[in-house]
Image (tube, rainbow, N blue to C red):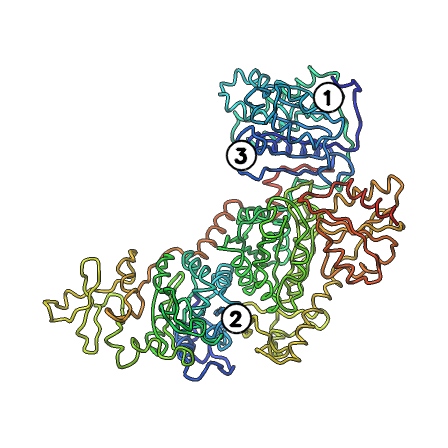
Amino acid sequence: MLPNTDVITKDSVVIRFSGDSGDGMQLAGNIFSNVSAGEGNAISTFPDYPAEIRAPQGSLSGVSGFQVHIGRGVHTPGDVADVLVAMNPAALKTNLRYLKKGGIIICDSDTFRPADLNKAEFATDDPVSELGIDPEHIMLVPMTTILKSALADSGMDQKAMMKCKNMLALGIVCWLFDRPVEGVLHKLKAKFAKKPAVYEANAKVVQAGWDYGHNTHASMPTYRIETEAVKPGVYTDVNGNTATAWGLIMASEKSGLPLFLGSYPITPATDILHELAKRKDLGVKACQMEDEIAGVCSAIGASYAGNLAVTSTSGPGLALKSEGIGLAVMAELPLVVIDVQRGGPSTGLPTKTEQTDLMQALYGRNGESPVCVVAAASPVDCFTMAFEAARIALEHMTPVILLTDAFIANGSSAWRVPEEGDYPAIKVPFVNKEMIEAGWTPYMRNEDTLVRYWAIPGTEDAMHRVGGLEKDAKTSVISTDGANHEKMVLTRRQKVADIAKDIPLIQIQGNVDADTLLVGWGGTYGHMLTACEELNGNGTPVALAQFRYINPLPANALDEIRKYKNVIVAELNTGMFADYLQQKLPGVEIKRINKIEGQPFMVSEIVDGVLNHINNK
Amino acid sequence: MENNNCIFVPGDFKNGASVRWCPGCGDHAILNTLHKAMARLGVAPKDTVVVSGIGCSSRLPYYMNTYGMHTIHGRAAAIATGVKTSRPELTVWQISGDGDGLAIGGNHFIHAVRRNVDINMLLLNNKIYGLTKGQYSPTSSRGTVSKSSPYGTTEDPFIPAELCFGARGNFFARSFDVGLDISVAVMEAAARHKGAAVVEILQNCVIFNNGIHAEIVDKEVRDDHTIYLKHGEKMIFGKNHDKGLVQDGFNIKAVTIGEDGYTLDDVLVHDAHCESNFLQQQLAMMDGRDLPLALGVIRDYDAPTYEAEVAAQVAEVKGKKNFSSLRDMVLKTSDTWTVE
């Protein structure tokens, strides 16, 4: 067995729960991370689902995982796990590669039966040695046996009992990490408030797991995880898609406009539609339309009618919405378009993450068609950036594309529930009576911001027509005049460029005085920040600029980048943001770190990439 | 529908823009009848939104003194759905041609009809693409010779009524461009109907498909080739008002009253409001050759509308949960913890 070292203190640990899709690994992981967060740990989680909806039980393709990273300085769900929980041989086999060297495995030894081993394609009846696992590092727990004895008096049948197996594993993990069972029981009580018998059974099993760890493996080391001081407030655990939906609702509250979503199911964006469909309880109208085009078009209709209008999608859907977005550019209507990026092109890797829609978002429309593009940096930042996308769209009368990705959309971390006053009021540029009386026309603009004024149906004496045809700058009637067209093209472009005056400056993080600037954008933030901290901690000074405002860039962006000798852009594509910056920084040599594997960066890949660039200098 | 006390005249819905359709185009007459129908409805121009796609007829919003959107090809129904669902109190009209509405916009058309969004959909059918200068459309008859079918088309057309019924439409009416009285009546009926209302208007393209409906709706032949259906009235037509439609097994037959033993009692009475659309479909499918083309309101059946159901569900769920804000909802429904 494992060496007896009593209590190990660590900044953070990564635990990976793995099992069949039906094993409830996500629930176990979620409860564990939330209990840890309640103890003061920072948390970051990420689910890893199989592509199949219901793969055969016990098969290699049916394994799902849920990774939890808790502690201090936690910015990502972790590259590799300190502890792997494997509920069957298939989970053990497929997840072993995510375990850190020397990490601990907790495995259900009752599942090492010939049928299970066969389904997991083992050649021998000894999976531990077949996989080359050091027996010192694996806790073989007869989970089914313990489960049955714990629930012997419950009157439950075997099938019902097996549903509690995840709680047994959770009990063991709680013991290992010195987490109080009470915290778990509290969460379970809330979850099964209406099913007291189910609560009782699960509570018994969690305790049985904790006791098993405590009694049988007293010689195992247990861990104490560092806590992190965070801003006081009420916290909950939120994933990126839910945070996106909530950010839009916050913008609806702060603008006073009803929220309308026109959408069509597409992986990995559908959960935004799911959440907003639930939020009819907050007055949201979420409409599942007949296709992606109808999704954006219904939103454009709702925008013209005066709603905060949104459409949510992923890359292929964004392609279908291009013409509609162009209409919103031309009609200068506020519109939020959310693209939860996934692997492309075409159907690509629907469940995997990538940052390959940047060029599509920036340029993927006919004609001179500038839109504002922003990106969220983390699951929690999805809330802020969805709010920002809506704020910019409404205050600047323009479509805004918010780029998130499959990684942050499904990943979650602790989020402080905003309090009154945390987010500003959104000031919508409605036309007013005085303007109308003074001879308002639809494309009359605020001279400072170039934003046109918004007249919504129902407004007295402001009846007007908008559309895809070019309009005269003064009279707003159809115009094919060349000089007028050029004026309008340049005006729309300047209007979007001027948004730079209304967004925060880029804040350089890490060692700002370093020679090397690591540049990223959007959802890679956690890995970038961790890599930056690691490099600085290991004697390689590095600064970090993570961009969330892409078009326009923050006003100080180019000047900040020019200050550094080495500029290295890391992104999950072949270099789209690097190209975008290069075009704006002709004299600067921009180096690149790229990955297009449908997976987030590993911190080590960024660290190695930076060191390679520096050393090859 | 808001019914203002003030009385509107057609001119209230007309704006000063010069109309750019070809001289002799059927769209001129349709525009005028729409102004008249809107005046009769009594909904203010400020509460009226006219949405169109792309095509000759889709220019129509620019000639209205209402709120209007001239959008992109085929998408008017989807955009109108967004306007109406977000603001159910507005009166929403959609103007589409046969190409815009049934080819590129066919998907949105059938789904708007299926969903039963309260939009008044005017489908201007000239069986040709006019704005792109003369290609066959999805309503062009098999064999139509056009610029893109120099040897004749090798495909069958949609019959708009059939598509509307296939999409479970609850309102279908038909008129023709110069049939001013019928057009005003069916437009008004469409607007008063709660739900998706499809009005097919046979329209003449004087340049690329001149006379395409002539053998049915020209003044000389009209009385014998069309029948103006009115709810609750006998289905009688013909120059001398002596022809009628009677049931013939599962089919409809045109007879001359007083001949072959048929009397006025045998003539069917039109029921536009019945739930079953069996007979209405047969009436709508009459093509003006063996049987007269049906004009007027063929089906007008009340069913729950999409926007009203959405609004009602929002109100119900909102009332039940009674959250005061996003924060309130999160605190009451999520697993939370407090950091002091």
Reading the image, the residue beneath label 2 is B70
Residue type, mark 3 in image: Ala
- Image label count: 3
Q: Are marks 2 and 1 on the same chain?
A: no
Which mark, residue A134?
A: 1
Is residue A438 or residue A300 the one in the foreground?
A300
Q: Amino acid at mark 2?
A: His
Residue drawn at the location 77% of the way across and 42% of the way down: A605
Subunit that carries the residue with mark 2: B
State the SS at label 1: loop
Res. A109 image quadrant: top right
Q: Position of residue A242 (x, y in %)?
A: 61, 46
CA–CA distance in space, label 3 to label 2: 49 Å
Front one among A548 and A391: A548
Image quarter of residue A449: bottom right
Q: Chain of mark 1?
A: A
State yes or no: discs 2 and 1 in contact (Cβ < 8 Å). no
| Chain assignment, label 3 | A
Q: Amino acid at mark 1?
A: Asp
What is the x, y in percent for residue B195?
Answer: 40, 60
User: Where is residue A152 shown, x and y percent of the image?
Assistant: 53, 15
Q: Is label 3 in contact with label 1 (beta carbons under 8 Å)?
A: no
A122 lies left or right of A134: left
Label 2, secondary structure: give it.
strand
> Looking at the image, is mark 3 or mark 1 earlier in the sequence?
3
